[in-house]
């Protein structure tokens, strides 16, 4: 009989396909004006993912807008070539930070431990400011969904 943790470990050995979204009004507006946008957090995410022998099949900068975030999430949930969807940014406490509000209703299961662990590790680096992040993760339509803070350091940590 195979134990659940052994099944998880076996699944973890397969190559995963990631879809990445940077959620940032300022970067989105700059992109729509045709300006060059240097998205360091996205670059860090791609580096980390590829270093672990996984692949990125989609990367995009989107606006801090609930409807746009939901539209992109639904698009990725319908794609058969996407295993993991990561939203980078919009997880703080500002009025414009709406990533969690957009994504959480789609979770069939939420991995509360992800956010708890992320805040604990962040606390070791940045102190009490770690309490201000609402990083979270969950599962929808058989895909993992992660919502991370927008800083490159936060992306590396996750």
Image: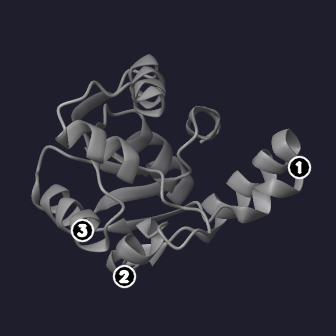
Secondary structure of the residue carrying numbered label 2: helix
The disc placed on residue 145 is: none
- Between tags 1 and 3, which lies in front? 1
Mark-to-mark CA distance, 1 and 3: 35 Å
Which is in the foreground here, disc 2 or disc 1? 1
**Residue located 61% across and 59% down the image:** 114
Q: Categorize mark 2 by other alpha carbons within 10 Å: few (<14), some (14-19), many (20+).
A: few
| Rendered image: mark on residue 127 | 1
Is tag 1's residue or tag 3's residue first in the polypeptide sequence? 1
Q: Cα distance, mark 2 to mark 3?
A: 13 Å
State which tag comes first along the sequence, 2 or 1: 2
CA–CA distance in space, label 2 to label 1: 30 Å
Q: Is residue 65 above or below residue 1?
A: below
Residue 22 in picture, x, y percent from top left = 37, 45
Say which residue appears at 24% left-offset and 37% top-offset.
31
Left or right of 34: which side holds 88? right
Image side of residue 121 versus residue 69, left or right:
right
> At which x and y percent is residue 95?
52, 74
Which mark, by number, is residue 141?
3
Residue under the image location 49 percent in, 66 percent down: 97
Picture quadrant of residue 111:
bottom right
Outermost front residue: 33
Circle count: 3
- Percent across and percent down for residue 20 are 32, 42
């Amino acid at each position: 009989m195979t134990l659940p943790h052994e099944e998880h470990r076996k699944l973890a050995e397969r190559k995963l396909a990631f879809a990445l979204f940077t959620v940032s009004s300022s970067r989105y507006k700059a992109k729509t004006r045709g300006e060059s946008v240097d998205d360091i957090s996205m670059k860090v995410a791609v580096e980390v993912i590829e270093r672990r022998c996984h692949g990125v099949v989609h990367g995009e900068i989107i606006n801090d807008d609930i409807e746009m975030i939901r539209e992109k999430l639904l698009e990725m949930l319908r794609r058969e070539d996407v295993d993991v969807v990561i939203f980078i940014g919009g997880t703080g406490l500002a009025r414009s930070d709406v990533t969690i509000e957009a994504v959480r209703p789609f979770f069939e299961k939420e991995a509360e431990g992800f956010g708890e662990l992320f805040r604990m590790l962040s606390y070791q680096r940045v102190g009490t400011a770690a309490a201000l992040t609402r990083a979270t993760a969950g599962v929808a339509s058989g895909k993992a969904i992660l919502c991370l803070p927008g800083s490159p350091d936060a992306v590396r940590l996750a």
